[in-house]
Amino acid sequence: MYFSKHNEKTVYINHYSGLLEVEGEGLLVKEDTEAWPTMGRGWQNEYDTLSITEGITGLGEGYLEAFPKIVCLILSRTVESVATTPELDKRLCKNKVLIRGEYDTYAEKFAKEKGLKFLHCDIPLADDYIETGHEHDIITLRFHEKGAPDIHYNCFTPGSSAGSYGGGEYYNELPKNFYVGCTIERFAADFPERLQQQLMTNDMLRRFLDTANIRIKK
């Protein structure tokens, strides 16, 4: 984790998978790409996926140019603008950058305007705490450019010694059209009762199911 030298509220969370999450408020500007503690010059080149989280309202002029290696840009529903230049537009198309976000948001509009592919963002579903095994599972509905969607489980369990952790990952594949006629009540019914409340109050999941079914009817 590191921070913008320009705005202390802008926080970068780096993942070894090539994902860089950006947390903050308001508009991100070019100066925000100078971060501390420094990771060396050209640190932005280490990431191929940039995720702009909720609270951020836009990417200002010069910000996106600082990340030349990205092939996937994830925009939360609070993002309302992304400043680009003709040169950047060409690079986005050349690199076949995938735009991800929720339906009927600026992310989808941006992809259409720039002639880029759009894919709905993954949906965090629930956190499952299994007391008998001291296990914590993070459950996510994932969408893929190629292949069927799935329910992904990232499991964390205590390790064999203090301070160590075990666990693993697995997923259950879904039919490509799993959402057809599916209400949030029906979706939640396939999960243990202890997760029902989390799923029934999951606004992102509800929006996806409602919008996906509306689009089928058009």
Image (cartoon, rainbow, N blue to C red):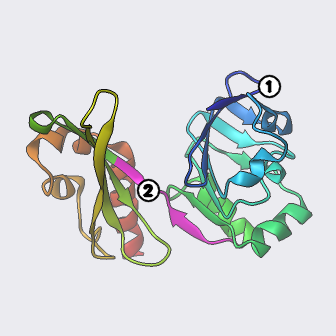
Image point 55% across, 54% down: which residue? 17
Where is the N terminus found, in terms of image quarters? top right
Which residue in the protein does label 2 denote?
122
Q: Is residue 5 above or below residue 172?
A: above
Using the image as rendered, state which of residue 91 and residue 213 is in the foreground: 91
Q: Which residue is mark 1?
A: 5
Question: Residue 65, position in %: x, y?
Answer: 83, 53
Q: Which mark is residue 205?
A: none
Taking depth in this image into account, of 20 and 86 the one nearest to the observer is 20
Give the number of the mark in front: 2 or 1.
1
Report the amino acid beneath label 1: Lys
Alpha-carbon span between mark 2 and mark 1: 30 Å
When asked about the image quadrant of residue 97, the answer is bottom right
Residue 105 x/y as whole percent: 57, 53
Where is residue 109? Give x, y as percent: 64, 61
Tell me if I can see residue 155 in this picture. Answer: no
Q: Is residue 18 magenta?
A: no
* Relative to 96, 153 lies left or right: left
Which structural element holds mark 2?
Answer: loop
Quarter of the image with the C terminus is bottom left
* Residue ID at (89%, 58%): 85
Q: Earlier in the sequence, mark 2 or mark 1?
A: 1
Q: Which residues are magenta?
A: 116-124
Quarter assignment of residue 176? bottom left
Count the labels in the image.
2
Disc 1, SS: loop
